[in-house]
Image: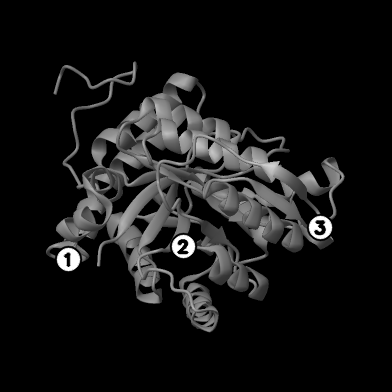
Amino acid sequence: MRVSIGLGLAEYPFETAAGFWRWVDLCEQAGADSLWQTDRIVSRAPILECMTMLAALAGRTRRLKFGMNVVSLAFRDPVLLAKQCATIDVLSEGRLLPAFGIGSPLAPEWQAMGLDTANRGRVTDEALEIITRLWRGGSLDFAGRYFTLKGASIAPLPVQPDLPVWIGGGSPAAIRRTARFGTGWQAGGETPEEVAAVIAAIRTECAAQGRRIDEDHYGASFNFHFGSPQDPPAQRVMVAYAARTGRDPACGVVAGDAAAILQRIAEYVEAGVTKFILRPVGGGDEQPLAQTRLLLEQVLPLAAARWPRAAGAEACCRAACGPRRVRCLVPEWRPPLSPIGKNGRESASG
């Protein structure tokens, strides 16, 4: 078993664009598996538009994979989104990890954009069918309840011959959607116990539909903070989490040391998860960078030692996917580099 640890952003915490790029460069150089951006179009808080952010990452990075966590399909045109995903996959040489969902019924977009929450599941299912069919190439005629297409096509097609489709959501409908369309499932705010139940249900539904999702394609995410739960950054996240979800505030962030973060990862691994999106807590240019550096320097080597990649896994992946995809999909953990300077480049003092 190999546990993969990526990092994510919801709100944009940085004071400057330079601070953001220093964070990206650190993740690229110090061994993070992937970067993820939460999807939000309408907000008062600063949140980057996810597709634009991923396109920027494609140009800045050479190793990292990246994805959206997760795109609410009811807010977007499926043909345009299919084209955006294909373009980003081409320009990144096959590093995009698309992830889709129906969107929270409490999201501000529904009222602001005049959309009906009652139809969001059916709209999402039609959009997923359109997107996945367009990625296969050819001309698409589609007559649905919410979308009608005649002779639609996109080019260039994604570099990845089978572009991954990660699905979010833990409802019965989301489970059926994952079994029908998904190559992976990404948890939202579910606890490890809740995740275990959803994964079991997805496996049952996949069997009923004659499909299978790889055992290492189940993901989870949580906020982390090296420090005390009483620290102001952790407290702010906990209060916001409780207000948004109605759950115990303590579930909103894992605060403590590397052992505490590794323990939460282990609880999810026990539930069947191997892919992680961890979000650093804190604002400004320095706090997210410092928190991320601690995660990469302290937690990644512990995770690699506890859940080592099986012998021969890289050779197997090379045979199945070719050398390029081994480089992208099975990155090695590397020891921390010299300090990242303010210009985003490696400091000469190392």
Three-letter residue code for mark 1: Ala
Would you say residue 335 is visible in this rendering? Answer: yes
Of residues 95 and 306, the one drawn nearer to the viewer in this rendering: 95
Amino acid at pointer 2? Gly
Helix, strand or loop under label 3: helix
Residue at x 38% of width, y 68% of height: 214
The number of discs equals: 3
Q: Position of residue 266 (x, y in %)?
A: 33, 68
**Vertically, is 21 above or below 163?**
above
How far across and down, in percent of the image, does residue 52 sit?
A: 56, 30
Q: Which mark is residue 184?
A: 2
Asked if the residues shown at circle 3 and circle 1 are in contact, with their CB atoms under 8 angstroms apart, the answer is: no
**Structural distance between the alpha carbons of marks 3 and 1:** 44 Å
- Camera-nearest label, 3 or 2: 2
Viewer can see residue 285: no
Dividing the image into 4 quarters, which one contains the C terminus? top left
Give the mark nearest the N terminus, 3 or 2.
3
Marker disc for residue 310 = 1
Closest to the observer, 349 or 344: 344
User: Crowding at label 3, few (<14), some or many (≥20) Cα neighbours within 10 Å?
Assistant: some
Residue identifier under label 3:
117
Residue type beneath disc 3: Thr
- Residue drawn at x 58%, y 53% is 133
Q: Position of residue 284 (x, y in %)?
A: 48, 29
Residue 325: x percent and y percent? 28, 46
The Cα atoms of the two marked residues, 3 and 2, are separated by 25 Å
- Mark before the other along the chain sequence, 2 or 1: 2
